[in-house]
Image: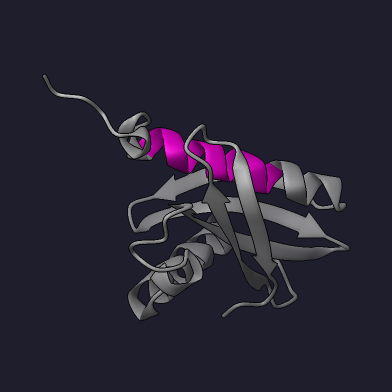
């Protein structure tokens, strides 16, 4: 009989959606205005685009389960991911807004319990 372990109860997509929802709720609670979620173009996706005190913020959300076998969520933001987010942000700025200031690139790391509740959330402002 194939039994799912507690970590396999939810799909990767469900875990990602739970982490992004937690991040969006957190940002809203601290005064950010969520402008876009999961904004996509050919080059990729930005998890959350928000505005805080007139500044545009592109947010990459990374999550892991409580076991951290693969390392922390922050450690998964590598050079390739940074370049991709910056590239997609440039396209967003070109297509959607004419923004004069310099945007911020934040990372929110979320550690999820087996039931998809949040064990911890860490907001790294201006991460890259």
Could you tell me what secondary structure mostly forms the magenta stretch? helix
Examine the image and state in which quarter residue 53 appears. Answer: bottom right
Whether 66 is among the magenta residues is no
Colour style of the rendered protein structure? one colour
Image position of 28 with respect to 84: above or below: above
Q: Residue furthest left?
A: 1
Count of number-bearing discs: 0
Residue 107 x/y as whole percent? 59, 66
Q: Is residue 97 visible?
A: no
Q: Residue at x 11, y 19 (%)?
A: 1
Indicate yes or no whether the magenta region holds residue 23.
Answer: yes
Residue at 51% across, 32% down: 115
Please indicate whether residue 18 sits to the left or right of residue 123 in the image: left
Is 40 located above or below residue 72 in the figure? above
Magenta part of the protein: which range? 13-24
Q: Name the residue: 53% across, 35% down.
A: 116
Quadrant of the drawing holding the C terminus: bottom right
Q: Can you say whether 101 is above or below 22 in the image? A: below
- View extreme (front): residue: 1
**Left or right: where does residue 58 sit relative to residue 4?**
right
- Of 93 and 4, nearer the camera is 4
Q: Could you say which quadrant of the image residue 44 lies in? A: bottom left
Asked whether 32 or 12 is in front, the reply is: 12
Residue 77's x, y, as percent? 43, 71
Q: Position of residue 124 (x, y in %)?
A: 66, 71
Measuring from the top left, give residue 114's x and y in whole percent: 47, 37
């Amino acid at each position: 009989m194939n039994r799912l372990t507690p970590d396999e109860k939810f799909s990767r997509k469900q875990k990602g959606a739970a982490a992004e929802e937690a991040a969006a709720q957190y940002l809203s609670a601290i005064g950010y205005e969520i402008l876009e979620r999961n904004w996509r173009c050919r080059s990729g996706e930005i998890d959350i685009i928000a505005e805080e005190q007139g500044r545009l913020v592109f947010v990459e959300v990374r999550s892991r389960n409580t076991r951290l076998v693969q390392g922390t969520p922050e450690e998964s933001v590598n050079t390739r991911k940074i370049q991709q987010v910056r590239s997609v942000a440039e396209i967003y700025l070109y297509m959607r807004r004419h923004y004069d200031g310099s945007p911020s690139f934040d990372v929110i790391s979320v550690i999820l319990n087996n039931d998809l509740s949040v064990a911890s959330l860490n907001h790294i402002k201006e991460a890259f």
